[in-house]
Image: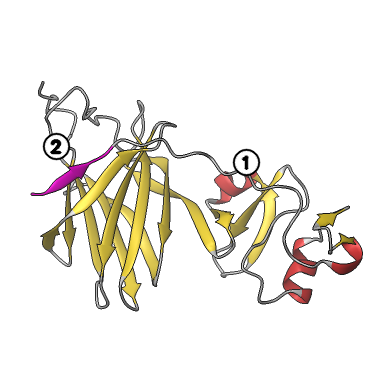
Amino acid sequence: MHEIITVTVIAVLMLQSTSAYDYGAFGDAKRGVFTSLPSLKEQLVHYPHTQQLECSNPDHVLVTRPNGKWACVYHDTATYLKWDIVTFLKPGTQLITTLVLRGEQYHNASYQITNADIESIRWNEEGHGLLVNITAAGHGVIVLGAPIYSGGLFEHYCDPAQSSSANFMVLMNGEETDFQSYESGNGLVNVEIEFEAGVKTIEIINLRPPYIQCQG
């Protein structure tokens, strides 16, 4: 098992109310200043090839519905309906927040992925970890994030600065593979995995079930 541990702090990128896209009558495109943000429908109709969408209502979150369509709803609504929340960190780069059922409770998990589509993410009780099914078109990277605080998916995580215990093992198509893991500074641990075309399953096996203590 080869686990490369690094500890970093990732700055949270806040999307501004203005946008880099030419929204014409909505403001001064030359200066990149917009008096109002177009509605989601107007963004989709007039700028179908845009690589970044935003909700005009700051109280809304951008979601993808089960039918694949976009919507802007309140956060509580997205949680209740279990719709994936999408944040554009930059044009073309999406951070997806989804809900994973473990036992009888749903838990937040997030992911970014390149050159592949996520088919499903679920908790594997047998492996005490996340089972991800993907369709990979070529070489890509997936970064999966899950909470390490009490009640989170990886709540028994051992701090690498204080423990020599390994936290994860990663299987790709049933074979162990290298990966990187790092804390993001907001109660999450990220597991970063590279993959190639043809990969169907990625398993992040949690080596820290509740009955195994962290070693000093």
* The C terminus: image quadrant: top left
Residue at x-position 41% and y-position 41%: 107
For the magenta stretch, what is the residue range?
Answer: 1-6
Quick check: 156 above or below 26? above
Q: Position of residue 91 (x, y in %)?
A: 59, 62
Q: Is residue 196 magenta?
A: no
Residue at x-position 77% and y-position 48%: 57
Say which of 135 and 124 sits in front. Answer: 135
Say which of 34 and 136 sits in front. Answer: 34
Label 1–label 2 contact, CB within 8 A:
no
**Callout 2 crowding tier (Cα within 10 Å): few <14, some 14–19, many ≥20:** many
Say which of 90 and 32 sits in front. Answer: 32
Residue at x-position 52% and y-position 51%: 82
Q: CA distance from mark 1 to mark 2?
A: 36 Å
Residue at x-position 66% and y-position 76%: 49
Of discs 1 and 2, which sits in the foreground?
A: 2
Horizontally, residue 42 falls left or right of residue 176, namely right
Label 1's element? helix
**Callout 1 crowding tier (Cα within 10 Å): few <14, some 14–19, many ≥20:** few
Name the residue at the front extreme.
Answer: 31
Report which residue position mark 1 lands on: 76
Report which residue position mark 2 lands on: 166
Q: Position of residue 54 (x, y in %)?
A: 69, 56
Quick check: 49 above or below 132? below
Q: Which residue type does callout 1 highlight?
A: Asp
Horizontally, residue 185 falls left or right of residue 19, namely left
Say which of 92 and 157 sits in front. Answer: 92
Quadrant of res 44: bottom right
Label 2's element? loop
Q: Which residue type does callout 2 highlight?
A: Ala
Quick check: 79 above or below 111? above
